[in-house]
């Protein structure tokens, strides 16, 4: 059996064997514009399988993945299993099927294998309404431009049609269809092997072990480190890791090519490596030239000013029909008042937990109301099972 270490926000290929014929894509001199839907930082594009159109997550770090529903609907042949290890490094064995034809607009791909992805049916990914994921095994022979202002993606092999400035280019490595990787400059020095992962909604996140080393060596001032504790990053296999410590770090800047994004806190560190995700698309147009190994970032006006990210100081998820605290930001009001990972929320911002559980996807997609509040009442059971009521103020990064 071949082994793949596969990451949902970014999937790292170690080996991939096609059992039922070689996959093929034979277009030349093409230029395809496709509209996309933007949901919680995920890019959803229309993908056709045997004439039926579905919404797929476009993931520059991922391989082809489909839901069990799609596989069943098209009676796709199982061709074996594959062991995947997600962003949290928890392994799972998943089935593979052969897909005779997949289409992105007028572009068609033949005889690709697809992984059956259980996380597509799990919260919160299920709230996206996606039936699959399409990624680097399709994009490896393309130039791809992401334009969030116009909500369109261009797939082409004609670089001259994109009117790119060569000064906006950064060298990119994406050999053998692997996830694109960059070397970036920052206020903390050069950062190597940074993945561009359109399946992640990060702006920038450190590899967790690298961040930990910088902190331990005193390279980062204590007041520039935000500590978190809890559960982070459901893997592609649908498993959650154990509770652990993590970090967000204040950066004076990260530079992509000749442009800087300044004065922001990184996203939560990832075990799989440093990354840039779709959040960067709020600041400029991104182009990945997989043919010539170049990454272009063309900023919008004021594209160097990162947004602040207020937080109530903890995250939540649905587990066994309950609203559970997944992580807590240390030094937040919530942490100071004793809220811990694993606590059960009974009422939040005036709504009982049952409302969030019953209508979670709509609330998740539209945005949690407490994220905009100056003060929020929280009723919860602590880990000892005692009911507590608190009024919390947001923690602002």
Image (spheres, grey):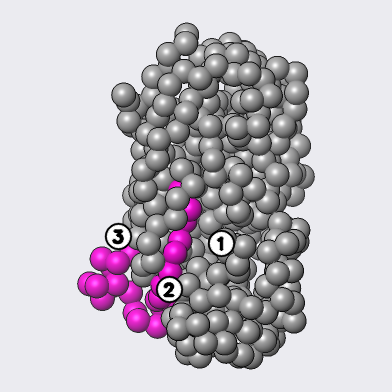
- Percent across and percent down for residue 346 are 64, 78
- Percent across and percent down for residue 182 are 41, 44
Q: Callout 1: helix, strand or loop?
A: strand
For the residues labelled 2 and 3, the Cα–Cα distance comes to: 15 Å
For the residues labelled 2 and 1, the Cα–Cα distance comes to: 20 Å
For the residues labelled 1 and 3, the Cα–Cα distance comes to: 28 Å
Quadrant showing the N terminus: top left
- Taking depth in this image into account, of 301 and 31 the one nearest to the observer is 31
Mark number, residue 228: 2
- Taking depth in this image into account, of 178 and 251 the one nearest to the observer is 178
**Is residue 225 one of those drawn in magenta?**
yes
Above-or-below relation of 54 to 357: above
- Residue at the spot 45% in from the left edge and 50% down from the top edge: 239
Above-or-below relation of 74 to 334: above
For disc 3, the marked residue is 209
Residue range corresponding to the magenta coloring: 211-235
- Percent across and percent down for residue 268 are 45, 64
- Residue at the spot 40% in from the left edge and 35% down from the top edge: 93
- Taking depth in this image into account, of 227 and 94 the one nearest to the observer is 94
Q: Is residue 10 visible?
A: no
- Residue at the spot 67% in from the left edge and 86% down from the top edge: 377
- Quarter holding residue 5: top left
Q: Callout 3: helix, strand or loop?
A: helix
For disc 1, the marked residue is 319
Above-or-below relation of 180 to 161: below
Q: Earlier in the sequence, mark 1 or mark 3?
A: 3
Foreground tag (2 vs 3): 2
Q: Callout 2: helix, strand or loop?
A: strand
Q: Is residue 77 visible?
A: yes
Q: Earlier in the sequence, mark 2 or mark 1?
A: 2
- Percent across and percent down for residue 246 are 39, 68
Instruction: Tell me: 27 left or right of 221.
Output: right
């Amino acid at each position: 059996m071949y082994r793949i270490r596969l990451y949902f926000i970014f999937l790292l290929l170690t080996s991939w064997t096609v059992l039922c014929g070689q996959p093929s894509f034979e277009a030349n001199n093409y230029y395809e514009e496709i509209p996309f839907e933007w949901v919680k930082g995920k890019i959803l594009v229309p993908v056709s399988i045997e004439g039926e159109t579905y919404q797929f997550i476009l993931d520059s770090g991922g391989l082809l993945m489909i839901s069990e529903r799609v596989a069943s609907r098209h009676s796709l042949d199982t061709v074996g299993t594959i062991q995947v290890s997600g962003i949290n490094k928890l392994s799972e064995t998943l089935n593979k099927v052969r897909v005779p034809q997949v289409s992105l607009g007028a572009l068609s791909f033949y005889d690709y294998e697809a992984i059956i992805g259980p996380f597509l049916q799990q919260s919160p990914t299920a709230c996206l309404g996606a039936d699959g994921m399409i990624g680097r095994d399709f994009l490896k022979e393309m130039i791809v431009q992401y334009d969030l202002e116009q909500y369109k993606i261009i797939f082409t092999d004609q670089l001259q049609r994109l009117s790119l400035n060569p000064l906006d280019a950064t060298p990119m490595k994406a050999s053998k269809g692997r996830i694109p990787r960059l070397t970036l400059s920052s206020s903390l020095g050069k950062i190597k092997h940074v993945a561009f992962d359109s399946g992640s909604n990060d702006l920038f996140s450190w590899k967790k072990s690298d961040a930990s080393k910088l902190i331990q060596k005193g390279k980062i001032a204590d007041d520039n480190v935000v500590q978190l504790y809890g559960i982070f990053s459901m893997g592609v296999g649908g498993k959650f890791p154990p509770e652990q410590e993590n970090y967000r770090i204040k950066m004076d800047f990260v530079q992509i090519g000749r442009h800087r994004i300044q004065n922001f806190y990184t996203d939560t560190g990832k075990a799989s490596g440093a990354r840039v995700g779709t959040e960067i698309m709020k600041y400029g147009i991104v182009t990945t030239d997989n043919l010539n190994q170049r990454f272009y970032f063309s900023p919008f006006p004021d594209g160097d000013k990162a947004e602040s990210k207020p937080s109530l100081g903890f995250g939540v998820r649905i587990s066994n029909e309950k609203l559970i605290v997944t992580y807590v930001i240390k030094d937040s009001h919530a942490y100071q008042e004793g809220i811990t990972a694993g606590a059960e929320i009974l009422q939040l911002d005036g709504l009982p937990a049952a409302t969030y559980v019953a209508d979670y996807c709509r609330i998740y997609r539209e945005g949690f109301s407490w994220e905009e509040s100056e003060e929020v009442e929280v009723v919860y059971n602590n880990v000892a099972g005692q009911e507590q009521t608190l009024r919390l103020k947001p923690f602002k990064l």
